[in-house]
Amino acid sequence: MKTLADAFTQTLQDVYYAEHALTKALPKVISAVSQPDLKKALQAHLDETKEQITLLDDVFSSIDQEAAGEKCEAIDGLIKETESVMDEATGKAAKHAAIVGCCQAIEHYEIARYGTLREWAKALGHAEAHEMLSQILDQEKAANHKLTHLAVTAINEA
């Protein structure tokens, strides 16, 4: 990387990989939970993640780049941690709480990445990319808020 444009493209490829990885991981997480509201929230986020991939395709197009992912060690690590929790947790309530915690770690990672990308798009004069990345960032923040609400109102009390 030599320029901000290089950093922007590389980070965009990073989140593109991450979103694809999450579409593979989330169905396993959904299967591992039995709490109805959590299951519903995770399914909704899976659907939203698929829509975000389409938006990312459009972001790449708006900057005249081919959509491509680049291996993201961070998301792979967060997914691996989530899988470990699903395998190791034996108490249903604890398992649900720990899964919410893992999902929030993923959301926080995505919020950080999309916030950075959005501001870099603005600095680089990519107005269309800035708008689409802002939309994804807002969705990630809403997903995190929904998880927090579920944790506070139902999961943690169990």
Image: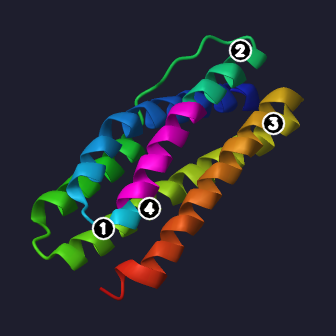
- The residue that disc 3 covers is 130
Q: Inspect the image, locate mark 1, and give the three-letter code of the amino acid beneath it.
A: Gln
* Magenta segment includes 44: yes
- The residue that disc 2 covers is 61
- Mark 4 → mark 2, Cα distance in angstroms: 29 Å
Residue 118, percent across and down? Answer: 75, 42
Viewer-nearest of labels 3 and 1? 1
- The residue that disc 4 covers is 105
Residue 60, percent across and down? Answer: 67, 19
- Mark 3 → mark 4, Cα distance in angstroms: 24 Å
Of label 3 and label 1, which has the lower sequence position? 1
Query: Which structural element holds mark 3?
Result: helix
Residue in the image at 67% along x and 25% along y: 6
Residue 38, percent across and down? Answer: 38, 63
Per the rendered image, the range of residues in magenta is: 39-52
Viewer-nearest of labels 1 and 2? 1
- Mark 1 → mark 2, Cα distance in angstroms: 39 Å
Q: Inspect the image, locate mark 3, and give the three-letter code of the amino acid beneath it.
A: His
Query: Which structural element holds mark 2?
Result: helix
Q: Inspect the image, locate mark 4, and give the three-letter code of the amino acid beneath it.
A: Ala
User: Quarter holding the N terminus?
Assistant: top right
* Residue 35, disc: 1
Closer-to-camera residue (131/65): 131
Residue in the image at 47% along x and 36% along y: 19
Q: Is residue 77 above or below residue 14?
A: below
User: Answer yes or no: do the residues labelled 4 and 2 have beta carbons within 8 Å?
Assistant: no
Residue in the image at 47% along x and 83% along y: 152
